[in-house]
Image (cartoon, rainbow, N blue to C red):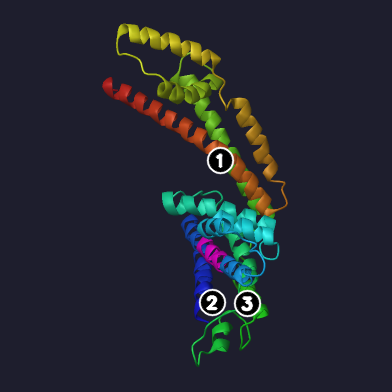
Amino acid sequence: MRELGKRLEMLEEACKQLDKGTSTGARLSLILLDNLAEIMMYEKVRYLFAHDSQFEGVIPRKYSDKLRKKVLLYFSEKVNLLVREKDTVLEDQGKILKAGHILRNEAYHRGQVRERIIRQVARTYLTVVCNLLPALWSGMFMFDPGEDIGGYLKQFGVDANMLDLDVLKSVCTYFLNGRECGVEELTNSLSSDLIQRIEDVIDGCEYLAKDGYERISADEVLKNLQFNPQFHEKHEFARTDEGFREFVKTREKEFAEYIPPITLATLDRWKSRAKAISSMVLHGAALDAYSDIDRMLCDIQETVGQAVYEFDEWVNMQVHDRGL
C-alpha cells in the first residue's frame, strides 16, 4: 500500500485545502492535484513504453525514442498521448488537465491567484483526478507485512480487506463527494472573469483618453500603447534638434500606417466569445475556450494596466510639485 497510500494522502490533503473555501486553499489544492495527475500519468506512460518494448526484436515499437523523450519531459505531451490511447484519458478530461496545469504554473511560479475562478477550477480538477486515479492505476501496490488494509480503508468509508479497482473507485468517490463543480458554476465564473477583465481594459483606455491624453480617442490610446514598444525597438535617434525632428516625422508616418492587432472592436469580439462560454456544456471545452481568450488578453491587459499606473504616478508627482 505504500506507493498508493502516498497518492491517496496527496488527494486527502488537496481536499482539506479545498474545504477551507479560500483562494489560497484552492491554489494549494490545485498544485497538489496537478502534481498527483502528472505522477499518475508518468507512471502510466512508463508502463505503456515498457509494454511496447517487450517484443521490439520481433515487431517495430509503436513509440519512437523521440516521442518517448518528449512525453516523459512534458505534461501536455503526456496528456496528448493518453488521450490518443482512448482507454485512459478522455478528450474533455485532457483539456481540463492542460488548462489546470497552466493555472497551476501561474500559482506556483508567479504566485498569481485568479480569485474569481480558482476555487471552481480546483474542484473541476479534483473531479478529473478522482476519475482518473483508478483508470491510471497499474493494479500494482506494495504493503508491509501485517498491515491492516481493512482498517486503512475504513477511514474512507469503504468496507473491504483487499484493494482492487472497485475499492479504489469507492475511495475516490469518498473524496469527491460534495466537492464537484457543476458545469454551469464553472462556465459562469470563467465567463464573468473574462468579461470583467476585458471591461477593465476598455475602461483603462477610456480613462487615459479622457484624462491622460488630449484630443485622442480610446481606440487611439490602444493603438499608441501597441505601437510605441515596437517603434522604439526598431529606431534609435540622435539626441539633437535634428534627431528630434527626424523622430517626429518618422513616428507620424509609421503611426499612420500601423494597423494595431487589437482594437476596441477586437475587445468587443472577445467579450462576445467570453459571454458564450457561460452556455457551454462541457467543463474541458469551457476551460479550453477560456484559455484561448486569456492568452490573447493577458499582454494587452498588462500593457493598459501599466499605462494607467504610470499616468496616475505622473498625476501624483504633479500634485506633489505644486504642493497641493
- Per the rendered image, the range of residues in magenta is 34-43
Q: Residue at x 65, y 77 (%)?
A: 170
Give the spatial CA distance, label 1 vs label 3. 37 Å
Residue 197 seen in the figure:
no
Q: Position of residue 213 (x, y in %)?
A: 45, 18
Residue 286 seen in the figure:
yes
Give the spatial CA distance, label 2 vs label 3. 10 Å
The quarter of the picture where residue 292 lies is: top right
Of residues 210 and 127, which is closer to you in this image? 127
On the image, numbered disc 3 is attached to which residue? 168
Give the spatial CA distance, label 2 vs label 1. 36 Å
Q: Residue at x 60, y 40 (%)?
A: 293
On the image, numbered disc 2 is attached to which residue? 4
Labelled disc at residue 295: 1
Residue 238 is left or right of residue 263, and the answer is: left
Q: Position of residue 114 (x, y in %)?
A: 51, 48
In the depicted structure, whether residue 293 falls above or below residue 149:
above
In the depicted structure, whether residue 315 falls above or below residue 78:
above
Residue type at numbered disc 3: Leu
Of residues 137 and 51, which is closer to you in this image? 51
